[in-house]
Image: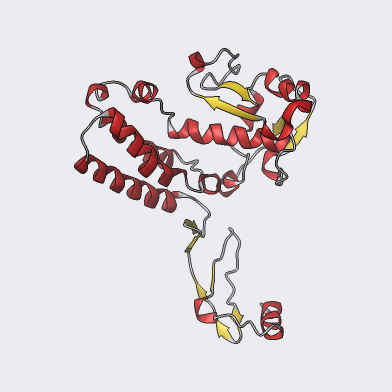
Amino acid sequence: MSRLDEWSRKWLLNFNAGKCKTMHVGRNNLQADYHLNGTPLQKTTEERDLGILVSFDLKPSQHVAKVAAKANSRLGIIKRNFIRDREILVPLYLSLVRPVMDYGVQSWSPYLVKDIQALEKVQRRATKLVPELSHLPYEERCQRLGLQTLSDRRKRGDMIQTYKLLHGFDDHCLTGLGHITAVTYGHLMTARGHTSYGTQKLEYGSELTDFWRDLDMWVFLVYTHNASIQNSALVVVFSNNPSSYDFPVGRKHKMFSTRVLY
């Protein structure tokens, strides 16, 4: 804090201490009092950063609750103002409701069952608005409407990002993926990671290494064989409808089929 104070004085850019706050994170945090320019800073347990609600325990539950409430509110507006036709409801849902639950999800992806279900209930409700499909199971409703479950959609995005990280298309830190090893039973690029604390599950990669290990080796060899064609445009796409592609499916997690676009 002293260095910040010195910096602000040197460059004549004073902080508004009345708007500055401190958030104490960690199990053994002593929760010390901090001062800036001689003004004691307020303590807070949650703050909004770029639209994402961050709480002192780093759990996404509070943000998930707000996101689910906002998405349900928009869904209610659609329900009251539009006819229940799939050709109208699906585009409205995709443009007005689902983006609310997709925004910044990499930073707050839920791992608690209650949070996962809270988001999934929104899409369950949305798919039931189509009269001719309301009697069908949720997964079948999604399939007929061309939707993925939100859980599968998040995993799909994580797999795409993991592929980019391991193949050098993205230079972000690989801390959350553990270490990369060639001594594996599956394929040549396997990420190994383990987390024991709840807050560590928010670290990118901590919850997806098992899914990544179970993908087939051909996914990784495609890059090797076609590296000279167009490296930067290679994208891996995962779908929850294996029958739509003529590609092998992962050994254990049958929800994934994989194709490569150039």
3, 140: nearer the viewer: 140
Residue 124 in view: no
Quadrant in which residue 201 is drawn: top right
Residue at image point 20% right, 43% down: 81
Locate residue 92, reporting x and y percent.
33, 39
Q: Position of residue 262 (x, y in %)?
A: 65, 26
Q: How is the model colour-coded?
A: secondary structure
- Is 124 placed left or right of 193 in the picture? left
Residue 153 is at least partly visible in this image: yes
Q: What's the residue at 41%, 47% (across, down)? A: 100
Q: Is residue 114 left or right of residue 22?
A: left
Closest to the observer: 161 or 212? 161
Note whether 25 is above or below 122 in the view shown: below
Which percent across, then down, holds residue 249? 58, 16
Decide: is 123 above or below 44: above
**In the figure, is residue 14 to the left or right of 123?**
right
Question: Residue 117 location, x and y as percent?
Answer: 39, 37
Image point (57%, 70%), residue name: 31
- Quadrant housing residue 227: top right
Number of on-image labels: 0
The N terminus is located in which quarter? bottom right
Q: Measuring 47% from the left and 57% from the top, which residue is drawn there?
A: 51
